[in-house]
Image (cartoon, rainbow, N blue to C red):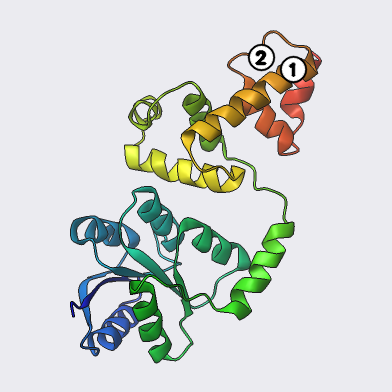
């Protein structure tokens, strides 16, 4: 049987080496890279395409949640296990929404991490019900998270038919970064693809123009709408009362 290939990332050297030692002690596991930060981990995942990545959430630079989102947005074949000392409900929900297949607390028994890696490598999930169920229940009752200014810009450009490469060129972003932003937008607006996102944007823009009785909203639409939906009425007031 081929060994499970693993990339491990943690910014604390002692934790990083400890996790590597625990995993390497199992004959069915091979750690192919041990990375001190998210940027190095993403590079290793792109180059080595490991079966599993064991990722810490809190890291400088590219943190664990951004790393999870990048792996998902780039459709890497790697399954992600999040290893965390403490995580808020929002972080847990973000990790799951981003595509994490396993979550293990650092104070759990180390054999649990080994079991988790095996299950995730086999296509399963390892999501502790005592942590996840409460987070999901509270998350379902939360209002949708508003888009950031950058996300609004990207949504407008998607609705205008621009490709990720064209969007990146206009905003001075890499194509990969645009994909990460789009992934976050999909999660916030609960759509699955660019076509659905563009359709939602155009529909809402038309509704906005009709409601405001405005024939000059073209090109202004989604930015105004999302700010208004996000309970920021400053643009709405300024535009409706020139």
Q: Are marks 2 and 1 in contact (CB under 8 Å)?
A: yes
Q: Which residue is identified by label 1?
A: 239
Image x and y of residue 189, in percent = 60, 42
Image x and y of residue 51, in percent = 27, 68
Q: Residue at x 59, y 46 (%)?
A: 188
236 on left or right of 201: right
Q: How crowded is mark 1: few (under 14 residues within 10 Å), some or many (20 or more)?
A: some
Quarter of the rendering occupied by the N terminus: bottom left
Q: Which of marks 2 and 1 is in front?
A: 2
- Determine the secondary structure under disc 2: loop
Q: Number of numbered discs present?
A: 2
Q: Residue at x 47, y 41 (%)?
A: 182
Q: Residue at x 46, y 82 (%)?
A: 106
Image x and y of residue 211, in percent = 79, 19
Q: How far separated are the C-alphas under marks 2 and 1?
A: 9 Å
Taking 44 as reference, is 32 above or below it?
below
- Determine the secondary structure under disc 1: helix
**Considering only order in the chain, which callout, 1 or 2, is on the residue closer to the N terminus?**
2
Q: Residues within 10 Å of mark 2 (few under 14, many from 20)?
A: some
């Amino acid at each position: 049987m081929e060994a499970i290939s693993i990339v491990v990332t943690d910014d604390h050297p002692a934790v990083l080496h400890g996790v590597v030692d625990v995993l390497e002690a199992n004959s069915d596991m091979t750690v192919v890279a041990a990375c001190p930060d998210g940027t190095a981990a993403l590079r290793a995942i792109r180059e080595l395409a490991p079966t599993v990545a064991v990722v810490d959430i809190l890291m400088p630079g590219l943190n664990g949640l951004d790393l999870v989102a990048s792996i998902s947005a780039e459709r890497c074949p790697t399954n992600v296990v999040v290893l965390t000392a403490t995580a808020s409900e929002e972080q847990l929900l973000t990790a799951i929404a981003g595509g994490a297949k396993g979550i293990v607390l650092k104070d759990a028994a180390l054999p649990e991490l080994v079991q988790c890696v095996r299950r995730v490598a086999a296509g399963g999930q390892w999501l502790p019900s005592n942590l996840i169920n409460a987070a999901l229940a509270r998350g379902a009752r939360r209002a949708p998270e508003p888009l950031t200014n950058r996300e609004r810009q990207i949504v407008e450009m998607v609705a205008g038919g621009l490709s990720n490469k064209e969007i990146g060129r206009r905003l001075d972003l890499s194509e990969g970064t645009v994909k990460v932003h789009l992934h976050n937008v999909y999660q916030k607006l609960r759509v699955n693809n660019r076509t659905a996102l563009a359709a939602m944007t155009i529909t809402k823009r038309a509704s906005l123009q009709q409601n405001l009785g405005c024939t000059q909203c073209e090109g202004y639409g989604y930015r105004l709408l999302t700010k208004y939906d996000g309970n920021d009425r400053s643009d709405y007031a300024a535009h409706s009362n020139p």
